[in-house]
Amino acid sequence: MSKINKAAINDLLSRGVVDTVVKNDLMEKLKSGRKLRIKLGIDPSGKDLHIGHMVVIKKLKEFQDMGHQIILLFGNFTGQIGDPTGKIEARAAKSKQELEKNAEKYLDQVKIFLDIDKIEVRWNADWLEKLNFADVIRLASCFTVAQMMERDMFQDRVKKNIPISMHEFMYPLMQGYDSVALKADLELGGTDQTFNLLAGRVIQKAYGQAPQDILTVPILEGLDGVKKMGKSENNYIAVDDEPKDMFGKVMSIPDNLILKYFELATNIDTEEIKKYKKALKEGENPMKIKKLLGKEIVKIYHSEQASHNAEIEFTNVFSKNELPEDIEETTIDAKAINLVELIVNEKMAPSKSEARRLIEQGGVKIDQEKITDVNHTLDLHNEKLLQVGKRKFLKVKGT
């Protein structure tokens, strides 16, 4: 590898970066031109990715473009336990087979940014399953109980009298041991992973290796503008969302997140983002800038034409009060159905409670008329147009 200029390194370590440990050490490694082994650990507990996950993948791409060795480590062992990070309760266990199946889907999705043929794909069951009890005791001796209890989520559980299982203390130890097995020079992760990333440094030292450097990226808030983007919160933009849904979701984010989404979720140049910031400060309509954001995000995951079409449809539906061009149709084997049941069955809301909330708040229409009765029964003798929220439409008829 050839040496990289200082300006490129500064940009790499500044845009979309919260912290670097140890920054000076990492800068020297990068300037030297040495090919680094850069690790990202993923427990594939879900079935697909959202654009919040892709923040760190985009950063990996920058390192890959500079010629470094990217290692995607899938936790087909640790994922069976689950990382307690950010969770007030222990996560439900996943099977090894389920995790590996999900990982294959993840690999297909990260191709959007990364050259998969040049990536080292590893599975931590390959070494963690082989540890004997003496190995585990040695690993556990690297940390004290007091150090583990410094973690915020454990302190919260103690205050709320919620149990902490011993196996949850083992998670950061296993993640740290992964860095030993991979001889990682650098590990990336979200800010919610800081404790686990630092554990890697401690454990590498204990096993006679040079400690890895660490780079953390911000957590991307979801559509509500408050909580971390995630499927459990139903505030996410999925990587495989249809263009019109993706664009519509972007348009629903709070205005104060526009610039953050540009920085973390697009490839727009930093100088261009500064122009958008200046325009907003001078009174530009946020809707105009948000449309540019929506087009950029759709272009990344679909195409430029798809982004153009998505903008046109959004304008027609929401600005001109027109209906979408292609509305999905479904046939129900009944002459009538409870509205809440229909909304949940057709996956237009994640739960009955959410469907009821949408109805009560006037977010559900039948044939363009609001329905606020949660006990409403839909008559299916004739085709009905169901609208849930601003973006979801469905034509329904009975048999």
Image: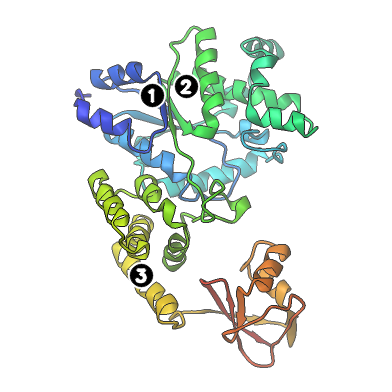
Nearer to us of marks 2 and 3 is 3
The label shown at residue 182 is 2
Crowd tier of the residue under label 3, counting other residues whose Cα lies within 10 Å: few below 14, some 14–19, many 20 or above: many
Instruction: Left or right? Give the position of 90 relative to 248.
Output: right
Tell me the SS state at disc 3.
Answer: helix
Q: Which residue is mark 3?
A: 311
Marks 1 & 3, CB-CB < 8 Å contact: no
Which residue is nearer to you in this view: 44 or 51?
Answer: 51
Quarter of the image that includes the N terminus: top left
The tag earlier along the polypeptide, 1 or 3, is 1
The label shown at residue 37 is 1
Looking at the image, residue 87 lies above or below residue 146: below
Q: What type is the residue that disc 3 sits on?
A: Glu
The image quadrant of residue 386 is bottom right
- For this orientation, the residue located farthest to the bottom is 382
Tell me what residue is drawn at x 50 percent, y 79 percent: 327
Q: What type is the residue that disc 1 sits on?
A: Arg
